Image: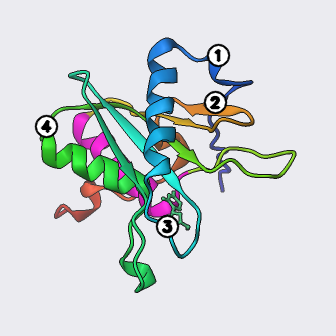
Amino acid sequence: MEKKKIGFELLIFEDETELSQNERKLLRNAMDARENAYAPYSKFKVGAAVLLENGQVVIGNNQENASYPSGLCAERVAVFQAGAKYPGVAITSIAISASPSQHEEAVPAAPCGNCRQSIIEYEQKQKSPISIILGSEKGPIYKCVSVADILPLAFNSSFLKDS
Ligand code: THU
């Protein structure tokens, strides 16, 4: 039996002033998008901003529904819109911002499992990493250099192929 430890490097910034100018702008786009989220049921607003290789930014926010499971997370609204609007253009990074928590020791909200799976699809397709920036106006900002880091052993299209 072999034991394998899987880990990743999480970059932690004290606040947005420590980010590069582009990252800071992208995070601001996510925070702005968050304000227009349609979240009347959970009251938990999330915004996302996707930066593409061609310099375009595509935003998304969570869209809820009276039939709860019919709603969609901010991240998927953003990446699916990017795929529809700019097909085949690689994604460089995605910034995600949930409403700041009132807790003293707040850490940034991270994407749900479904969103990680949706984003990794594009990472695998484009064969280049998509970095993830998580944060809000308050508390630290987290950065992962690749979605694969936060979704180890991900399901992917290779499993669908005939052996
Ligand atoms: N939500 C997101 O938009 N992104 C996530 O990664 C986690 C959760 C949304 C879905 C729902 O509208 C609300 O937050 C509460 O779960």
- Please give the range of residues in magenta: 111-126
- Checking the image for residue 101, the label placed there is none
Comparing labels 4 and 3, the label whose residue is closer to the camera: 3
Q: Mark 1 and mark 3 in contact? Answer it, CB < 8 Å.
A: no
> Residue 149, image x and y in percent?
53, 40
Q: Residue at x 68, y 50 (%)?
A: 3
Sequence-earlier tag: 4 or 2? 2
Disc 1 to disc 4, how far (Cα)?
Answer: 32 Å
Residue located beneath label 1 in the image? 17
Disc 1 to disc 3, how far (Cα)?
Answer: 29 Å
Q: Residue at x 70, y 24 (%)?
A: 15
Dot 1 amino acid type = Thr
Q: Is the shortest distance between ligand 1 and the CB of mark 3 under 8 Å?
A: yes
Give left or right: position of 125 versus 45: left
Q: Is residue 115 magenta?
A: yes
Comparing labels 1 and 3, the label whose residue is closer to the camera: 3
Residue located beneath label 4 in the image? 88
Residue located beneath label 2 in the image? 9
Q: Is the shortest distance between ligand 1 and the CB of mark 4 under 8 Å?
A: no
Q: Is residue 14 magenta?
A: no
- Checking the image for residue 39, the label placed there is 3
Comparing labels 4 and 2, the label whose residue is closer to the camera: 4
Dot 2 amino acid type = Glu
